[in-house]
Image (spheres, rainbow, N blue to C red):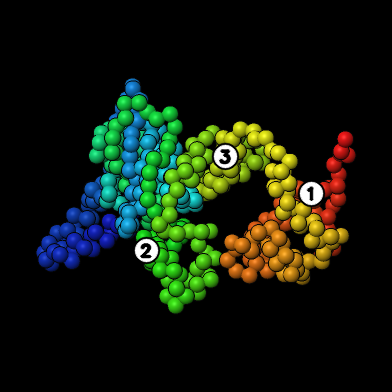
Amino acid sequence: MPTSDDVRRLAEQLMAELSPQQQQAFLGAIGADRSMALIENALRTPEPTVGAAPTRIRGFRVRLDLAGAKPPVWRRLELPGDLTLDRLHKVIQAAMGWLDGHLHRFRTGSDPRSPYFVTPFDVEEDEDGVLENGVRLDQVLTGTGDRLWYQYDFGDDWDHVLAVEAVLDQPPAEVRCTGGRMACPPEDCGGIWGYTELAAWVRGGCDPSSVPPPFEDAGHARDWLPLDWHPDLFDVDEANTALAAAVAAPLRVAGELAALVEQLERGGNRALTQLLARSASHTAVEVTEADAARLTEPYTVLLDLIGDGVRLTSAGYLPPALVEQLAERTGVTDWWIGKANREDLTWPVAQLRDSARALGLVSVRKGRLAPTGADRARPPER
């Protein structure tokens, strides 16, 4: 919604185009009590039009495009008409590959000043409007060719357009992605222009002599990029796996964990919610002895290397030589970019140590990492 500063700027533009006589008349009008309110009302963004919810639920086949991307970055989705916009937001995030770490907005037009739906964050900021949580997709889209705009990250300004390709007689049993092209841009890469430069650099083989800003060098850029990211890669199965987790009902949690989920979601971070949803969407899987050995092998390697205990560095990290051995024996060296000799710069090794400590396999006392003996505390074989 325009502010008083917007109104002031408009008045200044009008004044610059008027003659001295017209300026005097204009200033006189502005001085009247009702004039400023009239101008503000003229600039106010109208609320979006929302139709009545249909009695019969149908489905939509839509194409979601990232505006300005060349080559096009898009996804084809099948959606039920009763999908609410807050859940559509989660679907778009999962299908595209975003991390849901920024604010978003649904608009009914391509112009940023078009009518839009407010989010719970907007409501907390005392903004009035039509809340997205109570609006269904089939209340804003009805036929082939209808469009809805979605903006993500008001800094990088990722604009998407969702266009109806077909109206389905029956809603799909589940939200699904049936096609797409190109990887999602990395978060916080500078918008469409930063993404374009970054994608061209990766397609060109990551030439160290032409590293795009703001990276210091090729190593810095590769470390910052998502693992194995390439702009031309897209996997529809991975998209559907992400969608299944995004729309699944999360496990019911209480106490401190529930408070943490709420706090993170309020700030736009759904990582914990998605993790709980993913665990709820999978049934129990039987683990064979061979599977168990493979899954526990990294911990066996860690315990073997530290022996009776190892002294940590003054900063509290594993010694570089031990980090190198861990990375080599667990296979991290085969795919990790870099030397893999510093725990603080080699997150797979750091995560292995943290999880081993969380499982009670190792502990730190007086600057030494040592086994707890929990690995030996198992019932004798019969």
* Rendering coords of residue 16 (x, y %): 18, 66
**Label 3, label 1: how far apart the Cα atoms are:** 25 Å
**Label 2, label 3: how far apart the Cα atoms are:** 32 Å
- Circle 3 sits in a helix, a strand or a loop, which is it? helix
Answer few, some or many: residues within 10 Å of disc 3's Cα (few below 14, many 20 plus, some between 14 and 19): many
Q: Is residue 246 visible?
A: no
- Identify which amino acid the numbered label 2 is placed on: Thr
The residue to which callout 2 is attached is: 196
- Identify which amino acid the numbered label 1 is placed on: Gly
Q: Pick whichever, 299 or 163, lies toward us.
A: 299
- Identify which amino acid the numbered label 3 is placed on: Arg
Q: Is residue 181 left or right of residue 309?
A: left
Q: Pick whichever, 51 or 143, lies toward us.
A: 143
- Answer with mark 2 or mark 1, whichever residue precedes in sequence: 2
Quadrant of the rendered image containing residue 4: bottom left
- Circle 2 sits in a helix, a strand or a loop, which is it? helix
The residue to which callout 1 is attached is: 360
- Answer with mark 3 or mark 1, whichever residue precedes in sequence: 3
Q: Is residue 7 left or right of residue 106?
A: left
Q: Residue at x 52, y 64 (%)?
A: 224
The residue to which callout 3 is attached is: 278
Check whether the beta carbons of the residues at disc 2 and disc 1 lie within 8 A of each other. no
Residue 293 against residue 190 in the figure, above or below? above
- Answer with mark 2 or mark 3, whichever residue precedes in sequence: 2
